[in-house]
Amino acid sequence: MNKLTTRIKLGFGAIALATAVPAMSQAEPYKDYTPSEEVVEMTLVRVDEGQSDNYLSGLRKTWVAANEIDQKLGRLKNFSIYMVPYGDNEFNIVLIEPRWVCRRLFGL
């Protein structure tokens, strides 16, 4: 049974490799898109019901203050906080930070 399982796995691997190689040869870098100089960091937070105001006041003292310093230093373009006001979701607060990547920070 082990030899049969190994052969099946090798067969699927060979098929995957054979179909992936033509797809890679068709890709042309920078033809369909323009590279961005920023990375968007998105944090999804689940806050217990009725605790959003407490969490947001804590963010104001820590996360917002740190991002305002990063903005003044030029490392951060802007930042946002979004609330999800409906449903039993996995998260109900979204924190977004578009940051400049190493090209800008390290002169690349």
Image (cartoon, rainbow, N blue to C red):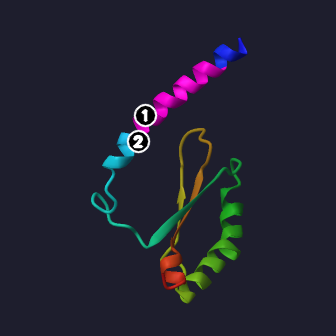
Side (left or right) of 40 relative to 6: left
The extreme top residue here reads 1
Q: Which residue is mark 1?
A: 18
In this picture, which residue range is highlighted in magenta?
6-20
Side (left or right) of 40 relative to 44: left
Residue 92 in the image: above or below residue 66: above
Q: Are marks 1 and 2 in contact (CB under 8 Å)?
A: yes
Q: Is residue 75 magenta?
A: no
Residue 80 in the image: above or below residue 19: below
Q: CA distance from mark 1 to mark 2?
A: 6 Å
Q: Which mark is residue 86?
A: none
Count neighbours of disc 1 (C-alpha within 10 A) and say few if under 14, some if 14 to 19, many if 20 or more.
few
Q: Residue at x 53, y 25 (%)?
A: 12
Where residue 72 sits, quadrant-wise, is bottom right
Q: Position of residue 108 (x, y in %)?
A: 48, 81
Side (left or right) of 103 relative to 43: left
Q: Residue at x 51, y 74 (%)?
A: 101
Q: Is residue 15 magenta?
A: yes
Where residue 36 sits, quadrant-wise, is bottom left
Residue 58 in the image: above or below residue 43: below
Q: Position of residue 41 (x, y in %)?
A: 55, 63
Q: Residue at x 49, y 85 (%)?
A: 107
Residue type at mark 2 is: Val
Say which quadrant the N terminus sits in.
top right
Residue type at mark 1 is: Ala
Q: Which residue is mark 2?
A: 21
Residue 87 in the image: above or below residue 108: above
The extreme bottom residue here reads 73
